[in-house]
Image: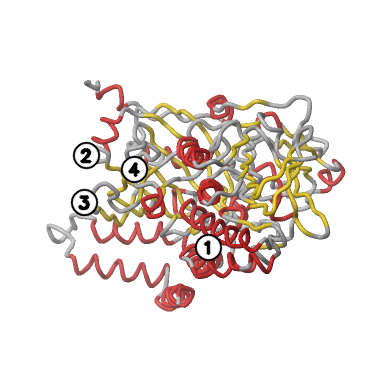
Amino acid sequence: MSEQFDVAIVGAGPGASMAAYCLAQAGLSVIMFERGDAPGSKAMFGGVLYTPILEQFFPDFVTEGCVERHVVEKRFGLLAEADEIAVGFRFLSFEPPYYNHSFTGLRARFDRWLAGKAEAAGAVLVTSTVVDEVIRADGRVVGVRARREGGDVRANVVIAADGANSLLAKQAGLRKELPLSVILGIKEVVSLPREVIEDRFNLEGNEGVALEYLGGAAVKGSMGAAFIYTNRDTLSVGLGCPLHALQDLKEQPHELLNHFKQHPAVRRLLRGTTPEEYCAHLIPELGPADLPAMVTDGMLVIGGAAGLINANPMFHEGTNMAMASGILAARVIIDAHKRGDFSAASLAGYETALRQSFAWQDMARYQRLTRMAAQQPEMFARYPYEFARMAKMLMTVRATGNDFQVPKRQLELDVLDHFLAQIGVFSFARQMADMARAML
Amino acid sequence: MSVNIAEYLTPAKILTRDEKLALDVIRANEADPHLKIIDQEVCVRCTTKPCTVTCPVQNYHAEADGHTTIYWESCIECGTCRIICPSTNIAWKYPAGGFGVSYRYG
């Protein structure tokens, strides 16, 4: 006789823990399986956490220490070989304690904290336990099989919250194999005293920055982006590129990160740092086409396992979308529990609610932009270099033979000539129109 | 507390693959390698070998005879090889509970 729970959750990431918390609060029996020795020990993100959901559920989350610094500056840079142009946003007018609901974080710390909330609400957390498959009976999912003696656990509903690779969702036919457009994210966490971080990045107290570097010399012209985020006394330094781009680039990903770290505009930000950890993870940004279904009889899929990631040049979100999907899944399961019906039809409300939420809408909207960008490799391979070059041409101050200094009119014409020759009005206009169309 | 700023103006350390891996806590399960090549002959016929240039810890090595060696002990379980192999020739599973990488930051 195996153990019986109302709900079995495979995974103990942010989506899993939010689902477990809501279900346990409603009085359902919940078991969460974490394959690492603690929640978060197999997880990695950039990363910045977006926290309106946390405010709603755990208003003291900031003082409880689950996050690092609140982001006051977002900067998007384009790197050429030795130059940089950037657009920065520095918002100092947001109010404490939540500011702009954007906090840098580290998953080993955050996931553990959130899983603790679920446990305190009554959920059972089992660590160091891999779940390889679901148990089926009469065509429906009735539990999970953990890889150990007597590892069968019966449950009315199984939530696949097993992250990027979600072997469970794939096995249950809820998801196709990940496409080569999936992003490989790698990062080094490097330490630096907090005073040095605050001085170097122009910060007061617990303020933080999120620096993004799109294409260009940050990733050797490949599709992708690199980043530096400030944590309390560490920096997260990393990059992400789709697998198809890495395959074409034929450069070891960890050496690509070394290359970024040594860029003249980047290396000065990293002086004196001590490497603490190297990590890598897939970022499973999917689109509606990769997700045939979100529910089946006795099972549903949430978070990264459901491809709920909004990874594009502008926004990098995912943990918030996972938490939202976990809450929505829990609500639908609580209703199904009252009805005593755990069929796909009874759980279908999850998909409806998810499609109406920001999580699905943002994923569906921005994956079109990502797909379009994949068809325009020059945006990453050439434009960062060309834009930096044109800016440099315009800003270069130099003498000429027949006058004291080159007049600005001449510089403007030089830039225009360069633009026409290297980029072209029509192709640029067409690309901008394609981008606008992808977003409409 | 005071910080001697000169200490923090030295160039950042640039690490080799082995130095990066040495930072991580990884417990290999010698009794049960979690990655295996299904058929080495498929690797011999493979001309592109994308596993050798996409694994973030450079765990895939193409031998002179075309066979593939996997340094599975230093796997950090990202799943790249599982998807990148054009012939789906890698038997891939998670290491057993308590084994594999254990991030302290993530």
Q: Nearer the viewer, residue A133 or A328?
A: A328
Q: CA distance from mark 2 to mark 1?
A: 39 Å
Q: CA distance from mark 4 to mark 2?
A: 21 Å
Q: Secondary structure at mark 2?
A: loop
Which of marks 3 and 2 precedes in the sequence?
3
Residue on which disc 4 sits: A60
Q: Secondary structure at mark 4?
A: loop
The answer, for residue B106, to whether it is visible in the render is no
Residue on which disc 2 sits: A204
Q: Position of residue A165 (x, y in %)?
A: 65, 49
Q: Which mark is residue A320?
A: none
The amino acid type, in three-letter code, at marker 2 is Glu
Q: CA distance from mark 4 to mark 1?
A: 44 Å
Q: Secondary structure at mark 1?
A: loop
Q: Which mark is residue A92?
A: 3
Residue on which disc 1 sits: A377
Q: CA distance from mark 1 to mark 3?
A: 36 Å
Q: Position of residue A382 (x, y in %)?
A: 46, 60
> Mark 2 near mark 1, Cβ–Cβ under 8 Å?
no
The amino acid type, in three-letter code, at marker 1 is Pro
Which of marks 2 and 4 precedes in the sequence?
4
In which chain is the residue bearing label 3?
Answer: A
Direction left: furthest residue: A404
In which chain is the residue bearing label 1?
Answer: A
In which chain is the residue bearing label 4?
Answer: A
Question: In what quadrant of the picture does the N terminus of chain B appear?
Answer: top left
